[in-house]
Amino acid sequence: MSTRTDVEADVHDVHDRPADDRPPRARIAALDGVTWREVAFLLANLPVTLIGFVYVVVTVVVGAGLAVTVIGLPWLALGLAGARGLGRAERRRARALLGVRVDEPSPLPRSRGGVLAAMWARVKDPVAWRTVLYDFIRLPWGILTFTLTLVSLVVLWPLLPVITRALSNVDRALVRGLLSPSDELERRIAELESDRGVVVDTAAADLRRIERDLHDGAQARLVALAMGLGLAKEKLLEDPEAAATMVDEAHGEVKLALQELRDLARGIHPAVLTDRGLDAALSSVAARCTVPVKVSVDLDVRPAEAIEGIAYFTVSELLQNVSKHARARSASVEVWRTSDRLLLQVSDDGRGGARLDAGSGLRGLAERLGAVDGVFVVASPEGEGTTVTAELPWRPRQTTTRT
């Protein structure tokens, strides 16, 4: 801080003088705002640490002791949730009085497993447990700092800046050590927890889509086919011509059902992708687009199957958007590898204006790629077309050997 040099100068002045015989008002004026804020922090330590210690004992310690009972886990979860609040308040106090700039820890990821899973996430919260430790060990420190600061104000006035600086530096270290985020690891864990939820939700949505397509499409057609063949069997002897007509209609229904099953299988994982890779699979997708699409795939080797599948479905959905919404005359697809990243770029010369608004298909694609540590960028100025660039982590394809 800019005033720290002034404080040090004041300290040297104190040591240089054999005694401070100035009047009390003059001595008070000689201290700067930093020292007075440190004094305020240290004097407030006693009531603050007393409140924190009592809270920890009553809520967390008692909750841990009752963990074997029905009320133990909810009590402990609520206590740890409150501990997060105490930590937030202490960070604000340290920021205001000690000038300690500590980032707020990441919030707990949203639980998707019900009330029990949410409580268990609270119980495992490392931020709350570090706050509990902070409040538990600081009661004797709060008593010590309150006593020394009070004595310095009354008896050891010339040494007040030195004593408060030393004591407050210990408080600064405690705040940074126990109330700050656990570096990048904690944030990364929270992101991965959130990404895992996105993956689970996406998988559940895909399963519901497959179930709906089977129920409304192939299954309904096969049921109608079975009924038609049953009627044809009944008419086979009494009206062979009508039975032949019904069998012919059933044959047509079989072809349609097979086509629907092929389309459904292609939506799950197309055979051309498994057999021939991204170049052939994306060319097949491009051929079904309503505008001409130029495909360029520059890969020496194939990526891992999971990454290859994500790349395929990302391009497939983007080309569907081009067909439905872009009003474009042409489009292009480029796929290449740079170091440890697989890059995709889909461009069109349509009307532009595409955005990552909540609820849009592009937003869903961005969330899916984010769940696998990918990046999704949209550039779509009005009237100038759309360019979507996606990055995926490059993972080599695992080769299996048969014995």
Image (cartoon, grey):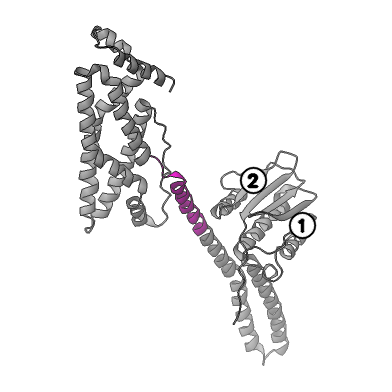
Q: Is residue 282 left or right of residue 395?
A: right
User: Which of the two labelled residues, at mark 1 and mark 2, occupies the earlier sequence position?
Assistant: 1
Name which residue lies at 43% across and 50% down. 110
Name which residue lies at 37% across and 16% down. 9
Residue 41 drawn above or below residue 394: above
Using the rendered view, name the quadrant where residue 151 is placed: top left
**Residue 254 marker:** none
How far from the left and from the top, in percent, is residue 366? 59, 50
Q: Which residue is more in the foreground, 209 or 87?
A: 87
> Is residue 184 within the magenta segment?
yes
Name which residue lies at 67% across and 48% down. 389
Q: Which residue is more in the foreground, 92 or 293?
A: 92
Residue 322 drawn above or below residue 214: above
Q: Which residue is mark 2?
A: 377
Residue 173 in sight from this viewpoint? yes
Q: Amino acid at mark 1?
A: Ser
Residue 352 drawn above or below residue 398: above
Please report the bounds of the magenta region as a residue range. Answer: 180-201
Q: Amino acid at mark 2?
A: Val
Distance from disc 1 to disc 2, alpha carbons, whole Å, reads 19 Å
> Is residue 245 within the magenta segment?
no
Q: Which residue is mark 1?
A: 296
Q: Is residue 237 left or right of residue 14?
A: right
Magenta span: chief secondary structure: helix
How far from the left and from the top, in percent, is residue 73? 27, 54
Instruction: Count neighbours of disc 1 (C-alpha within 10 A) and say few if under 14, some if 14 to 19, many if 20 or more.
Output: some
Dot 1: element? strand
Using the rendered view, name the quadrant where residue 238 is placed: bottom right
